[in-house]
Amino acid sequence: MEAIIKLPEFIDVASRFGMTVELIVLFFFLFSIVAGCLIFKKTGNKAYKAVIPFYSEFVLFRTLGMSYILPIIYTVTRCYSLFISPFLKTPVLTILMSLTGFVAGVIMYMKKSVRLSDYFGKSQPFKVGLIVMQPVFLLILAFGRSRFLKNDLNEVKDE
């Protein structure tokens, strides 16, 4: 009988824990959207462009003066993996496209983070933090006093 009594308590604790985790994830998701909009405004773009998938990457890459080739490779490989590969029976091509997309995504993520921190005049430790814990450091960029330095060519280190 004790097991029957402890089961509802366990379910209650588990559901409260799950609800807490969901609220924390929702909180970070909403703040990430707001941070993206504020960063886009600081870079001189319209804030709504930050919430459009794929397009926001192209706009940010254009703003940071970077090549479009990585976002194009990433987008094509992701679309292939999501929409085409489930219907094909070619595992080699699917693996190759997935690896290409993964490598392009990692390179794109790291280059974008470094360039973004350069254009905001941030230090090397901030670059590492932006790569390792991007949501937290994007909030720092968005809500902090830093300003976008793209027009100040002497202050920005070009790669």
Image (spheres, grey):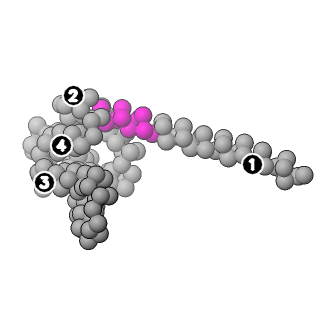
Real-space Cα distance between discs 4 and 3?
A: 10 Å
- Residue type at mark 4: give it: Phe
Q: In the displayed structure, would residue 107 be above or below residue 11?
A: below
Kindly identify the residue that appears in the image at 21 percent across and 39 percent down. 55
Mark toward the viewer: 4 or 1 = 1
User: Is 4 above or below relative to 146?
Assistant: below
Return the residue at label 3: 69
Q: Which residue is mark 1?
A: 10
Q: Residues within 10 Å of mark 3 (few under 14, many from 20)?
A: few
Image coords of residue 93 (percent x, y) = 23, 67
- Disc on the earlier residue, 1 or 2: 1
Magenta-highlighted residues: 28-37
Residue 147, relative to residue 134: is it above or below? above
The alpha-carbon separation of the residues under discs 1 and 2 comes to: 48 Å
Q: Which residue is mark 2?
A: 46
Which numbered disc, 4 or 3, marks the residue that appears first in the sequence?
Answer: 4
Q: What is the spatial separation of the Cα atoms under label 2 and label 4, in whole angstroms?
A: 13 Å
**What is the quadrant of the C terminus in the image?**
bottom left
Q: Residue at x 16, y 51 (%)?
A: 72
